[in-house]
Image: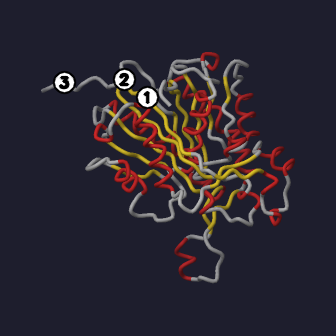
Amino acid sequence: MPSLPSPAYAAITALGVHRPKTAVANHQLPRHLDTDDLWIRTRTGIQSRRLASADETIAIMGSSAAGRALVAAGLPPSRIDAVIVATMSHTGQTPSVAVELAARIGCRRIPAFDVSAACAGFSYILELARCLIASHAARHVLLIGAERMTDIVDPRDRTTAVIFADGAGAAIVSRADRPGIFPAEWGSDGTLRDLLAQQPSWARFRDDVEKQPPYLRMSGQSLFRWALASLPPVADAALHRAALRAGELGAFIPHQANARITEALARALALEPYVTIADDIATQGNTSAASIPLAMHALLSARRAEPGAPALLLGFGGGVTFSAQVARLPAAY
C-alpha cells in the first residue's frame, strides 16, 4: 500500500488591496445620525472610513485586490488552483462572488466559492487554504476578503452606520519550504447569533413588504463583553499551536472592529511594546472579512512590520465566529 505524502507547508506570499476612492470623515456623516467626531473617535477609534461608489461592487473591488496580489506574487492566473472569497455582504446570494471574481481575473475551471463567517471570514479561509496545501490538493490558492457593508447597514442606525465600511484585501497562499501559516484555533457559538444578525430575514420581508428591509443589527456592548471574555484564550491557543510566545511576535493584526477592543485584547495578551498593533480602523473603518488583509497591507506598506515576521491574526464577529492563527508576513505587497 503506497504511503501518504508528508503534509506540505504553506505561506502567504503576496498581498493586494482595493481601498474605495471615497473617504468620509466623521464630520461629514449625515446629521440625522446625531453624533460627532469626538463621540465616534472615543468609542471606536475611527477618524474616517472608505465607502464604495456605485461602480465599486464586491466583485470589482475583489478582483482589483486579487489582480494586485497576483502581480506582486509574479503569478499568472493560470497557476491558481482555487479561489476562496470571504464576504458577508453579498446581496446576490447566488451565484457566488468567487465565480464572478475568478472569471474577471482569468481563472478558469478551478474551484471557486464563498465563505460566510462574518468578520472571522478571512481567518477562516486562510485556514482552508493552509489545509488545501497541506493535503497536496493545491499549490497556489487565491484568498479575498471583500465587503460592501454599506449595502447591508441601515443608514439611519448610529450603532452600525458610523462603524462599517467597504473594501477588499487579497492574499496568495502558496506551498513553502517552511511553515509560514500555523494551524488555526477556530470555532463558533450559535447561541449568540443574535448579537450581530440581519433582521428581518428576506423570507419575512418577502411575505410582508411593509416591514423594514433586512439590515445588519448589532448589540455592540454584548459583543464587546463577549470578545474580551472569550478571545484571549483563543489567541493563546493559536500561539501554542505555533510554538511561540507573545514576546516573539512581530505584529498583532486583529479584525478591525473597534480600537477599544484591539487595545483591550493587546493588554489581555500582555504584548510587549515592540509588537506592532494594527490600527487600520482609524482611516478605513470596519470592513468585516476584508479588515485583516487590509490592515496587514497597511503595516507592511508603512514599514511598521517586517516581511517574514510572525504575526498573530485574530478574526471574530457575527455568528458568533472566531479564528486565530500565526502567519509570517509576506515580502510582496
Lower sequence index among marks 1 and 2: 1
> Which three-letter amino acid code belongs to the residue tagged 2?
Ala
Q: Are marks 1 and 2 in contact (CB under 8 Å)?
A: yes
Above or below for 78 versus 330: below
Above or below for 209 versus 189: below
Give coordinates of residue 168: x percent, y percent: 53, 47
Above or below for 120 versus 72: below
> Which three-letter amino acid code belongs to the residue tagged 1?
Thr
Question: On the picture, is 5 further left or further right than 293?
Answer: left
Q: What element carries label 2?
A: strand
> Which three-letter amino acid code belongs to the residue tagged 3?
Ser
Mark sitting on residue 3: 3
Pointer 1 residue: 13
Q: How many marks?
A: 3
Residue at left 31%, top 32%?
139
Above or below for 283 versus 310: below
Camera-side residue of 89 and 231: 89
Distance of mark 3 from mark 1, alpha carbons? 29 Å
Mark sitting on residue 289: none
Camera-side residue of 240 and 75: 75
Q: Is mark 3 on a helix, strand or loop?
A: loop
Pointer 2 residue: 176
| Of the two numbered discs 3 and 2 in the rendering, the one whose residue sits closer to the viewer | 2
How many residues crowd around disc 3 within 10 Å: few (fewer than 14), some, or many (20 or more)? Answer: few
Residue at left 33%, top 25%?
8
Q: In which quarter of the image is residue 1?
A: top left
Camera-side residue of 188 and 197: 197
Lower sequence index among marks 3 and 1: 3
How many residues crowd around disc 2 within 10 Å: few (fewer than 14), some, or many (20 or more)? Answer: some
Give coordinates of residue 206: x percent, y percent: 53, 79
